[in-house]
Image: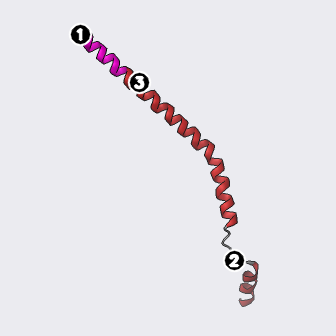
């Protein structure tokens, strides 16, 4: 009976340890995402501003002349 009780205690200890490690890793992951989001937004805005796909002003003027 003592061996069964000790096996149960060890398995409960292992399960709670795994749950606490999982919760800690999820917390670190969540904090990492929250810290990275503003930098991702700044980076995407900079890329979209750099790669502007609107036509140059001369082409816009020519399009107005053809109408």
Residue 16 - label: 3
Magenta residues (range): 1-12
Does dot 2 land on a helix, a strand or a loop? loop
Residue 55 - label: 2
Residue at x 69%, y 59% (from the top left corner): 46
Does dot 3 land on a helix, a strand or a loop? helix
Q: Is residue 7 magenta?
A: yes
x, y percent for residue 32: 58, 41
**Which numbered disc, 2 or 1, marks the residue closer to the eye?**
1
Q: In this view, does 21 lie to the left or right of 39?
A: left
Separation (CA) of disc 2 from disc 1: 82 Å
First in sequence: mark 2 vs mark 3: 3
Residue annotated with mark 1: 1
- Secondary structure, magenta segment, majority class: helix
x, y percent for residue 55: 69, 77
**Which numbered disc, 2 or 3, marks the residue closer to the eye?**
3
Separation (CA) of disc 3 from disc 1: 23 Å
């Amino acid at each position: 009976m003592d061996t069964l009780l000790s096996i149960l205690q060890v398995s409960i200890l292992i399960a709670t340890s795994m749950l606490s490690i999982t919760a800690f890793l999820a917390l670190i992951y969540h904090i990492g995402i929250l810290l990275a989001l503003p930098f991702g937004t700044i980076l995407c805005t900079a890329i979209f501003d750099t790669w502007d796909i609107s036509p140059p002003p001369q082409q816009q003027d020519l399009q107005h002349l053809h109408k």
